[in-house]
């Protein structure tokens, strides 16, 4: 008969503090008396501890990755930082011959991030402007109106839209969207809205901020709509029933009972979409036109932070050029981390107390 | 007075109808680009999907024909290398989150960081790996591309593994421990095995995601017009090749880009459908 060891147990399998709040989303996790007795028998404590620490180590690599990325970017961008400082982000240079502002001139060592900041912001906000109403519309349709048989396939389609690689969006945009804009949409925009100054007629290629904004909108739609859907399903059913019981129509129920309760989470979803749009690279690089200039017209060529890195990094002409690109990368990293963290917190704040299945 | 009420009721009905109509319109507008992309991919790509596409390397400019065999093999090598790095680390991280760290501050921090890391632009990963691996090595290489893809897989694999493990009922763990199985065996052979269909689909999801990544490969794997299987040399990759061909001025290369995209999208659609099938069937058959 094998000997049963009962004593000498330093092994503690449950690191979770019993008095802390239960983890969100998880089924409540109580340790039964039987289980803790069994675990405390100290069976193969060394192997168990080793395994435990190996898993902790792997979890810690995620922190390691973030720290490594940040430190590498900081170290490699030192050269540009010491040369330009904060001027890098808001000053431009003056061309001594033509007296025009000059932003990005690798040959003479002039580097300013201004046109790229402008391009990233303009294309991202254009994308949000187009994507947010559509995404909320889709989410409302799927959660509140859609017949049950359609819900599965439509959710699957939005999921697919999120899985298409950005280079394929870019390919499609170059050969289908840009010609379409050039031949049909842009002339119409210029005729109708040219007087505002935002739609100049001086770019015959069809590339530019509008093309980048549209393709970005298509790409960030799925993430916004799926998160909005998640937040809307988290609104308790009693809210809907209460509003309906007061004699509201379906739209009034959605507006007062659902959207109003879910608004913080929807804002979170939109910000998460913004985070995606800011860092999206390939599709934007392929259609934005890639010239480091600032134009008021949305039909003009531009350049974004990610697109200039993609275009120039592999053939950077010197240490300063490389360092300036690294600094752009660092700025992009910092901005997306802040935007993502903020958005995650907002979404968590809403879905934390959600019922397991609201439908 | 009565008229006013009637008008108000009418207005509300119209408003309700308009809102419904707008929601349907939005859905149609969202589905339209997907359908358009698929139709174009099949229309332009299917005719070029010949046998030589899978067996030939690209020909020089001006010669018709040629294929993308080197890019397909290159992508396979990069993805294998990425999975080798990303899958074990990601699964272990997920095991920590679900089995050892539930409710602790450390686990919450790891989960949050993983979610945030998921949103870091892939191009930033690319330049970070460039300065971590390519600069010390002194040249572009398949190895650095694999590292970049592996790092990108970790957060996704980690989070899905955690979610799948959380679905395993406690009774299963207790049953294992009651038989005197050590905890590590119980986690690996009972809990993880019970959740393995879900974990595998999570890995496939991460796999499908990085399969189409181009940005982190531009300065790591770099691309290669010829055949290469070596890990310390620049290597071709399918998405990278599509990018280069799409921006080239040659019709023959455009044709190859469409065909390559079709191959890539088929791979991804299959992966996503499989994930959907497995998760809809219930991740843990017989366990609940």
Image (cartoon, coloured by chain):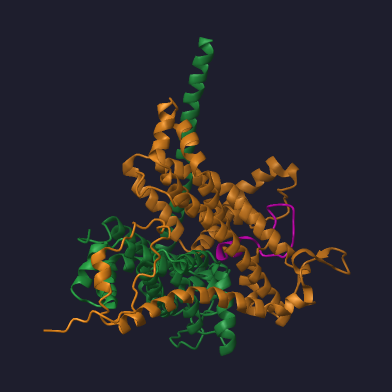
Residue A23 lies, in percent from the top left, at: 41, 59
Q: In percent of the image, x 61 and y 78: which residue is there?
A: A71
* Among the 4 quarters of the image, the one containing residue A19: bottom left
Q: In this rendering, is residue A161 above or below A146?
A: below
- In the rendering, at what x and y percent does residue A176 appear? 53, 55
- Quadrant (top left/top right/bottom left/bottom right) for the C terminus of chain B: bottom left
Magenta highlight on residue A294: yes
Which chain corresponds to the colour green? B
Q: Does the magenta stretch include residue A219?
A: no
Q: Where is residue A82 in the image (x, y as percent from the top left)?
A: 76, 77
Q: Quadrant of the N terminus of chain B?
A: top right
Residue A327 visible at all: yes
Q: Residue at x 70, y 59 (%)?
A: A118
Residue A132 place in picture, x, y as percent: 55, 47
The dominant secondary structure in magenta is loop
Q: What stretch is highlighted in magenta?
A: A281-301
Q: Can residue A224 be seen in this view?
A: no
Residue B247 vs A225, above or below: the answer is below
> Of residues A89 and A357, which is closer to you in this image?
A357
For image coordinates 52% across by 75% down, the residue present is A65
Task: Residue at 80% x, 65% y: name it.
Answer: A91
Q: Colour of chain A?
A: orange
Quarter occupied by residue A5: bottom left
Up-down: is A257 above or below A270?
above
Residue A338 sits in quarter: bottom right
Q: Which residue extends farthest front?
A: A7
Please, is residue B42 above or below residue A327 in the view? above
Disc tally is 0
Is A43 in front, or is B115? A43
Instruction: State left or right for residue B202 relative to residue A265.
Output: left
Residue B55 vs residue A120, the one in the foreground: A120
């Amino acid at each position: 008969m094998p000997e049963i060891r009962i004593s000498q147990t330093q092994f503690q399998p449950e690191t979770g503090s019993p008095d802390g709040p239960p983890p969100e989303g998880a089924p409540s996790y109580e340790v039964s008396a039987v289980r803790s007795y069994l675990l405390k028998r100290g069976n193969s404590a060394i192997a168990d501890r080793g395994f435990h620490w190996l898993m902790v180590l792997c979890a810690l690599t995620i922190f390691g990755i973030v720290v490594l990325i940040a430190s590498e970017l900081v170290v490699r961008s030192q050269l540009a930082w010491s040369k330009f400082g904060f001027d890098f982000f808001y000053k431009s240079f003056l061309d001594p011959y033509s007296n025009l502002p000059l932003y990005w001139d690798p040959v003479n060592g002039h580097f300013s991030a201004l046109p790229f900041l402008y391009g990233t912001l303009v294309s991202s906000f254009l994308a949000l402007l187009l994507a947010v109403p559509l995404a909320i519309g889709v989410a409302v349709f799927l959660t509140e109106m859609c017949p049950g048989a359609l819900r599965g396939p439509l959710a699957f389609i939005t999921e697919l839209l999120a899985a298409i690689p950005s280079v394929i969006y870019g390919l499609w945009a170059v050969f289908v969207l840009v010609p379409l804009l050039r031949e049909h949409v842009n002339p119409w925009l210029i005729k109708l809205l040219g007087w505002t100054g935002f739609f100049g007629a001086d770019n015959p290629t069809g590339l530019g901020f509008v093309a980048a904004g549209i393709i970005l909108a298509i790409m960030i739609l799925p993430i916004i709509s799926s998160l909005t859907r998640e937040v809307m399903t988290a609104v308790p059913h009693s809210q809907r029933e209460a509003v309906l019981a007061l004699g509201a129509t379906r739209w009034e129920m959605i507006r007062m009972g659902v959207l109003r309760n879910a608004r913080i989470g929807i804002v979170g979803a939109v910000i998460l979409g913004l985070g995606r749009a800011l860092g999206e690279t390939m599709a934007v690089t392929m259609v934005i036109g890639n010239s480091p200039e600032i134009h008021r017209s949305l039909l003009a060529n531009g350049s974004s932070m990610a697109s200039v890195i993609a275009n120039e990094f592999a053939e950077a002409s010197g240490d300063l050029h490389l360092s300036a690109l690294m600094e752009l990368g660092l700025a992009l990293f910092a901005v997306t981390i802040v935007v993502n963290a903020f958005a995650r917190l907002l979404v968590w704040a809403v879905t934390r107390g959600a019922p397991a299945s609201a439908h | 007075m009565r008229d006013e009420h009637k008008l108000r009721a009418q207005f509300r009905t119209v408003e309700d109808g308009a809102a419904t109509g707008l929601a349907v319109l939005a859905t149609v507008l969202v589905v339209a680009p997907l359908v358009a992309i698929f139709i174009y991919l099949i229309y332009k790509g299917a005719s070029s999907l010949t046998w030589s596409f899978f067996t030939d390397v690209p020909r020089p400019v001006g010669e018709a024909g040629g294929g993308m065999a080197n890019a397909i093999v290159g992508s396979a090598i990069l993805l294998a290398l990425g999975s080798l790095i990303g899958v074990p680390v990601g699964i272990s991280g997920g095991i920590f989150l679900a089995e050892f760290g539930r409710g602790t501050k450390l686990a919450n921090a790891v989960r949050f960081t993983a979610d945030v890391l998921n949103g870091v632009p892939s191009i930033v990963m690319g330049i970070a790996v460039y300065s971590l691996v390519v600069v010390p090595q002194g040249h572009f290489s398949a190895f650095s591309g694999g590292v970049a893809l592996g790092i990108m897989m970790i957060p996704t694999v980690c989070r899905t593994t955690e979610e799948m493990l959380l679905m395993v009922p406690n009774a299963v763990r207790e049953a294992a421990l009651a038989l005197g199985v050590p905890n590590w065996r119980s986690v690996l052979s009972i809990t993880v095995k019970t959740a393995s269909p879900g974990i595998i689909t999570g890995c496939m999801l991460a796999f499908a995601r990085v399969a189409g990544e181009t940005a982190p490969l531009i300065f790591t794997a770099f691309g290669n017009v010829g055949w290469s299987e070596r890990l310390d040399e620049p290597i071709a990759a399918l998405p990278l090749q599509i990018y280069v061909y799409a921006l080239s001025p040659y019709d023959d290369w455009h044709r190859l880009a469409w065909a390559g995209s079709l191959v890539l999208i088929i791979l991804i659609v299959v992966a996503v459908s499989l994930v959907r099938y497995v998760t809809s069937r219930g991740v843990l058959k017989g366990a609940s």
